[in-house]
Every structure is written in structure tokens, then in C-alpha cells.
Amino acid sequence: MLSGALVVLALALTAGRLSAQKVPQRLTLDDAISIAKANNPAFLSTQNDAGPADWGVRQAYAAFLPTASARGQAQYQQGGNQTFGNVVLGVSGTNFLQSYYNLGLSWTLDGQTIFGVPAARAQRKATDANIAAAAFDLESTVALQYMAVLRGQDGVDVAQRQLDRASQNLAIVKARVSSGAAAGADGLKAQVDQGQARVDLIKAQRQLREARELLGEQLGVPLEGDVELVSQFKIFQPTWSRDTLVDMALSSHPRLRADRAQVSAARATAKQAASRYFPSLSLSTGWAGYTQQATNKAFVLSSVEQGAANAVLACQQDNALLAAIPGYPGVTSRDCSQYAYTDAKGQAYLDKNNQFPFNFTKQPLSVGLSVSIPIFTGFSRQQQVSQANAAADDARQNVRAEELTLRTKVTQAYDALTAAYQVVQLEKQNQAWATEELGMKRRQYELGAVPLLDLMDAQTTATQADQSYLNAVYDFHLSLIQLDAAVGRRLERQ
């Protein structure tokens, strides 16, 4: 009862710690990854596999040790006739209390035991490699979602600038309409443009909230309050060699290392399966004891008296037979009174009867040695060996497939990154030109040199240029994160 209460208390404290954990107000990418590794449920579930794998190794080593067993039993036997069918096996005039114990040791050595250790160690390495791969996958996922939040924040800024521009245009249009320099329809068009800008801002804000919720889901801790994400990403011209990046991925990618470790584990399992053809050696020993006590003292004394009377009668009959032999020299009659019942004998038997439950009568020590050589098992061994070899080959093919996939991913991600860098440069220039054009059209409209439609077109072009530049910047950052994921490490920023 106490241990159950302690478990409940420990769970409550653990839950309290998890619920009390907060995301810092200034959240860097490294902070986000650390929080995710400590709280992401899927990753923690994968990390839990380490414990059973460690115990699997211990169990494999422990298979070389003998196993011990202990058994105890207490029984009540009611008196009466004991029958089997129509045959009376015995009659008991009293009830009995019985107890029994058995201590056993057994030790077995076979191929499963010998090859169990390398198989368990290989499986533990595969588990560790899989946890490392899951940690790296989590880093990539968090980085992508972190970038999505930053993109959402900048998207809100772009939408706000669009609304500010639309509001400025509306103010200019209203001034011209009130002075009679422009038609009232221009004012309606400017109001519609401002309304659309408000709609775009609302959508951008919603997308930001959604991105923040998804980031909190990956972290395993919700983002509460005004958590500020710190942008640490810069635009640079990639100068890595594609072949170098491919070599990095093929040599040390966590997912590939996990697949290769799985190959080693599958091969070790195949060797363990093949060891079923080996003979096995078993050694066993045991100690046992029992007690039996009659519950009726009168029954015990009656049995003793009857036994004594039978012994006296047998003694007298022996003396009579010896006396009847003619000329038998040196024949002397035995003193039959020594077999007669006495109170002392009765008490001695009562003391001896007082055995239940722990005054055991020990049984002789038993030791057994056996050797078993499997000859034919109905092709079960062949099926298990074939299945294990097929699993090992499947694991090897998975490694080849992963190598081909990584080669393709690295090539595509690097190509996307270099193209994204070029697009950023062009979109940056386009943004500058569109902003300059908008300012010029606004001044011309104020002077009446151009119609409102030209100002609206310039406004639309500037908005599209801002959005295109924003997309280009984050396409570059996302391509860089995808390249990190393909290579298997966070590349040094140039």
C-alpha cells in the first residue's frame, strides 16, 4: 500500500514538473531543440527503448548463470476412505497436516546462450543508433517549424506594410476627392484596396498563430504569452562541393548509421538462429523436504499401542518357533517386554508427530546431467534460420536504398539552395525597384499626373515584390535546413 502511494506521489511530482516548465521569452533555435528533446512525446517514446535494450544485454549475460527456483506447499488432508473407482486404497482415522519444500538449481549451455550476448549487444547498438537518428530527425523538424514561425512573423510585417501603404493611398485619394481633383470612384477604389489589405493582415496573423501552435506541438510545451523567436539566419552564397556533401551523408548520417546497426543486429540474430543446430548441455540439482502431522493425538497413541502389541506378538511367536527346533544349540528366548507399550514411548511418538509446518524430513540430494542433440525438428530450425537470413538481407537492402535516397536528397537540396540564393538576389532587386516605383507613382498621383489605376498597379506590384522577396528568403533558409537533414549534420554557415 505504501509503495503504491509513493508511485502516485512520484507521478504527481513528475506531472507537476512538466506542467510547470515554461518556454523562455526569447527562444533561440538551440533552445527550441533542447526543449523538444526533453518534452516531445514521440521522441521520448523512442528514447524509452534504451532501457529494455540494456536489460536485454544483462539478460544475455545472465543466461550463463544457473537459474534458481524455490517452492513451498502446505496441505490439509481429511481422514476417511481413499478410493479409486471401486477399490479402497486406504483408510485413515485422522486428519493430516502436510508441508513440502523444494529448492532447485539448473544450468543450461547451448548455442542460443553462446550467441545471445553478441545478438543482444548488436541490438542495443541498433537501439542507440535509432535513438540518435530520432533525435536528429526531431532537430530537423523543429528547425523547419521554427522557420515557419519566423516566416509567419515576417508575413505579418509584410501584410502590415501593405495595410499602411493602402491607408496612405486612401488618405491621398480622399484629399484629392475632397478638393475636386479626383472623382469619388477613386475614393471607393482606395477603400476597397485598404479593406483587402486588412483581410490579408488577418490571414497572415492567423497563419502565424497556427505556426506557433505547431511549434509548441513539436516542443511538447505550448508557446504561451509573447514568446519572441530570435532570427539567427543569414543569406550567404553556398560554396560547398556536392561530392563532399554526399560523402558526408554516406559516411555519418544518423539514419544511415541506424540502418547499418540494424544490419549488424540482424546478422547476429541470424547466427543465433543457426545455433539451434548445436547440442545443449543441462545440469540440475535440488533439495527437498516434507512434513506430515496427524491432528488426532488419540489416533497416534492408538497406532503406537497397536504397533507395540504387534511387536510383542511377533517376538513371542519367534521365541516359540526357536524353542520348537530340536537340538538347536544356544537358543535363548528374547525378552518380549522390551516391545511393550509404555507412556514414554507414546510421548516420544507424539513429539515426533509434531512436525508441521517447518520440522522437515530432508530428502536425499539429487543431481542430473543431460546432453541433448537436435536431430529432426520438423524443419522448424530451417524455417527460423531462413527467416533470420532473409531479415538480415532485407536490412542490407534497406541500407542500399537509404544510400541511394540520401545521394538524391543531397543533390536536390544543394541544387535548391544554390537556386534559392540566386532568386533571393533577384527578388531583393525587384523589391527595391517596386518600392521606388510606388513612391514615384504616389507623387505623380498627388500632382494629378497619373490616374489612380497606375497608383493601384504600383501598390500591387510593391506588395507582390515584398511577398516574393519574403518567399525567396525563406525558401533559402528552408532549403538550407533540408540540406542539413540530407547531409545528416548542421553545416557550418559560410
Image: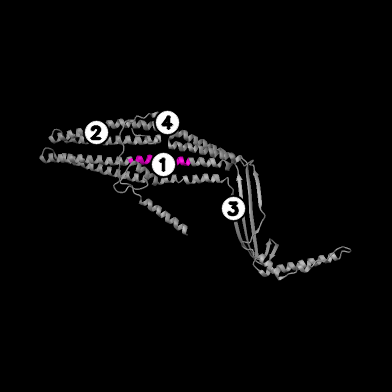
Image quadrant where one finds the C terminus: top left
Circle 1 sits on which residue? 135
Q: Is residue 101 above or below residue 52?
A: below
User: Label 1 vs label 3: CA separation?
Assistant: 43 Å
Mark closest to the chain's N terminus, 4 or 3:
3
Front-most of residues 422 and 333: 333
Q: Which residues are magenta?
A: 126-146
Q: Which mark is residue 58?
A: none
Please tell me how many numbered marks the rendered image carries.
4
Whether the residues at callouts 1 and 2 have beta carbons within 8 Å, the answer is: no
Q: Which mark is residue 247?
A: 4
User: Label 1 vs label 2: CA separation?
Assistant: 39 Å
Horizontal placement of 13 versus 193: left or right? right
Which amino acid type is marked by label 2?
Gln
Q: Is residue 400 above or below residue 111?
A: above
Residue extending farthest front: 330
Q: Is residue 284 above or below residue 323?
A: above
Residue 156 picture location, percent across and down: 26, 41
Q: Residue at x 59, y 48 (%)?
A: 66
Q: Secondary structure at mark 4?
A: helix
Q: Which mark is residue 431?
A: 2
Q: Quadrant of residue 268?
A: top right
Circle 3 sits on which residue? 69
Residue extending farthest right: 327
Which amino acid type is marked by label 4?
Asp
